[in-house]
């Protein structure tokens, strides 16, 4: 009696096939990780830009209102990042919630922040930060034209160029425009 040999059946994968599958799996995991990291960086960057835009928008609104409504004879800058505005007609002002009429508002740059302080007739209330994360801020009053030039430069963020961080705007005083 002769025993016939049965054909051999493959039972599993060869070492080469396992290594190829492992490399393909690692490439897929590496690609997914790269996608996650780049998405996270983009998300963080968008958050920084949104915060910067919100700060800048609020700052422009507040400073513009204060400069426009101040008395033309009561605007002074000291060329060191400080702007002082005086008022004669600003009553029932949001700065003066405890009563009194707004007499002066002072903006100053100190330690990466623009601070605002106000006087409602009883002395300065105490400076409060209005925008932070700055590298520089400057206020220049151009008396001959009656406007204030405001320059801000934010601290560097992810991939910011100097142009992306610098903002400059002009605000005309209402009294000086009509004279």
Image (spheres, grey):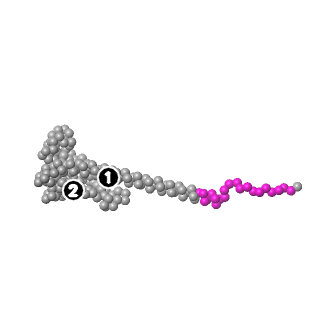
Residue closest to the far front: 178
Q: Is residue 28 visible?
A: yes
Determine the main secondary structure of the stretch shown in magenta: loop
Quadrant of the snapshot with the N terminus: bottom right
In the image, what residue occupies the spot 71% across and 56% down? 10
* Mark 2 or mark 1: whose residue is earlier in sequence: 1
19 shown above or below 50: below
Instruction: State which quarter of the image contains the C terminus.
Output: bottom left
In this rendering, the answer to whether 163 lies above or below 60 is below
What residue would you read off at disc 2? 170
Q: Which mark is residue 60?
A: none
Check if residue 11 falls in the magenta segment. Answer: yes
The location of residue 90, given as percent across then percent down, is 15, 44
Image-based side of 127 in relation to 158, left or right = left
Q: Secondary structure at mark 2?
A: strand
Helix, strand or loop at label 1? It is helix
What x and y, as percent, mark residue 108?
21, 52
- Tell me if residue 14 is in the magenta stretch: yes
- Furthest toward the top, the residue is 98
Q: CA distance from mark 2 to mark 1?
A: 19 Å
Taking the spot 63% from the left edge, 57% from the top edge, the residue there is 18
In magenta, the rendered stretch is 2-22
Where is residue 41 drawn, in percent x and y?
A: 41, 54
Residue 161 sits in which quadrant?
bottom left
Residue 83 x/y as whole percent: 18, 53
Observer-nearest of 41 and 178: 178
Q: Residue 52: which disc?
A: 1
Q: Can see residue 135?
A: no
Residue at image coords 49%, 55%: 33
Front residue of 148 and 30: 148
């Amino acid at each position: 009696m002769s025993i016939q040999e049965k054909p051999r059946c493959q039972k599993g994968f060869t070492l080469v096939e396992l290594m190829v599958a492992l490399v393909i799996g690692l490439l897929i995991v590496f690609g997914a990780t790269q996608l996650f990291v780049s998405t996270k960086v983009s998300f963080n960057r968008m958050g920084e830009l949104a915060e910067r835009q919100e700060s800048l928008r609020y700052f422009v609104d507040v400073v513009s209102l204060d400069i426009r409504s101040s008395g033309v004879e009561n605007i002074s800058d000291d060329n060191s990042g400080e702007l002082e505005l005086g008022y004669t007609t600003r009553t029932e002002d949001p700065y003066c919630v405890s009563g009194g009429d707004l007499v002066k508002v002072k903006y100053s740059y100190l330690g990466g922040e623009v601070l605002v302080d106000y006087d409602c007739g009883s002395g300065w209330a105490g400076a409060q930060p209005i925008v932070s994360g700055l590298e520089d801020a400057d206020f220049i009053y151009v008396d001959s034209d009656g406007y204030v030039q405001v320059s801000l430069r934010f601290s560097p963020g992810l991939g910011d160029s100097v142009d992306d961080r610098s903002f400059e705007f002009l605000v005309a005083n209402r009294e000086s425009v009509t004279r």
